[in-house]
Image: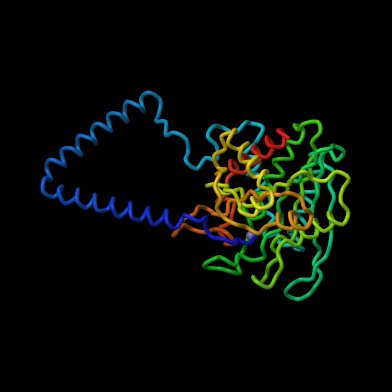
Amino acid sequence: MIKLSEVEPGTESRSASRRALQSARRETRDAAETSAERVPTKWLYRILGIAVLMTAVWVLVSSLGGIDRGPDPNSPTQGSIPSNYDPQRAMLYLTKLCDLGPRPSGSPAMQRQQRMLIDFFTHQGATVMMQTFEIRHPEDGSPVPMANLIASWYPGRPKRYLLCAHYDTRPYPDSDPRNKRGRFVGANDGASGTAALMEMAHQMNDLPDDVGVDMVLFDGEEFVWQQGRDEYFLGSKFFAEKYRAAPPAVPYRAGILLDMIGDRELKIYYERNSLRYARDLVKSVWKTADELGVRAFVPRVRHQIDDDHIPLNQIASIPTIDLIDFDYPRPGIGAPQYWHTEQDIPANCSGESIAAVVWVVHQWLKQQ
Ligand SMILES: [Zn+2]
């Protein structure tokens, strides 16, 4: 996907005020250190006293059965995730996908992935269809086979929803600071959305009687060999054009796109294009997350992202939102950046994050 805007308005001024606060704190600390030099013995006794007291408290608490460190600040949820959403299983799916290696469109690894997923979704009870087309390779013009994978549950039901993700990986980690032609397995950018839909497949026996779901894995989201020249969203454009040309008897009421939701420090903000095309849907999904205590869903605008939801909204008129955590692993000046680098690997992802998102989307579906 392509990020269009950096940060929400107001962040600049907030970081400026944070800087001011930090410098004020520094000044206070400097003043304290200066006076400490004047009365070193007094301070030494105080520190020693505090240390002795803290050790005593620690010994007491430990003897009573261990220290409760409180909730993990990186946990995506306030409480625990219900046991039918399985973080370990979701992580296993993500790892299996990455073990196939880099999976750009048309590659042997993509074909292995397709066989694995057709087998998986069929086994889970879905009706699987491959929507195939062909493009010209942007580098040499050779034909490249493309295929969107569509796994349908309860196609006869009157309320239909679209859940989607992309399953191709970018050919190279071209934002890597060291090795732009290195190995890119797309653990978060590619595998996390796919693994989420695999985990979601286990939840499909628990839906309202009138709700049906199509899961679509888009090919060619970023068959981009040269930024600025090559086209994004090939699979979702093809899907949207087919949908517009031959609308189904029962159109989708809504679509939810999952992309980069495997981050260990998951924070999913409102995405600006999703608000533009499907504001009510955004609000409704975040409301479900709030009711469940899934705090990884933050009800504030942050990035504006062009992703597979754009063709779905613009061409197919399916109101579709993008659930995406673009800050991988976290926002901030000086923070590492794993997006489109060799660091987008399973070790930087978390099954809890994927399971939390599946929980929210599944519960949201059950409320429809
Ligand atoms: Zn990407």
Q: Position of residue 148 (x, y in %)?
A: 79, 55
Residue depicted at 52% across the width and 53% down the height: 329
Q: Quadrant of the N terminus?
A: bottom right
Image quadrant of ligand 1 equals bottom right
Is 184 or 224 nearer to us in this picture? Answer: 224
Residue at x 56% of width, y 34% of height: 293
Q: Is residue 356 left or right of residue 8?
A: right
- Residue at the far bottom in the pictured view: 140
- Provide residue 41's location: percent of width, then percent of height: 11, 42
Where in the figure is residue 302, as x and y percent of width and height?
55, 53
The part of the image, by quadrant, that contains residue 106 is bottom right
Q: Percent position (x, y) of residue 87? A: 62, 39
**Going by the image, does 129 lie left or right of 32?**
right
Q: Quadrant of the C terminus?
A: top right
* Front in this rendered view, residue 83 or 241: 241
At horizontal 80% and vertical 60% (from top left) the residue drawn is: 238
Q: How is the image coloured?
A: rainbow
- The relative height of residue 193 versus residue 144 in the rendered view (above or below) is above
Q: Kindly identify the residue that appears in the image at 20 percent across and 34 percent down.
A: 49
Task: Report the side of 51 relative to 293 (left or right).
Answer: left
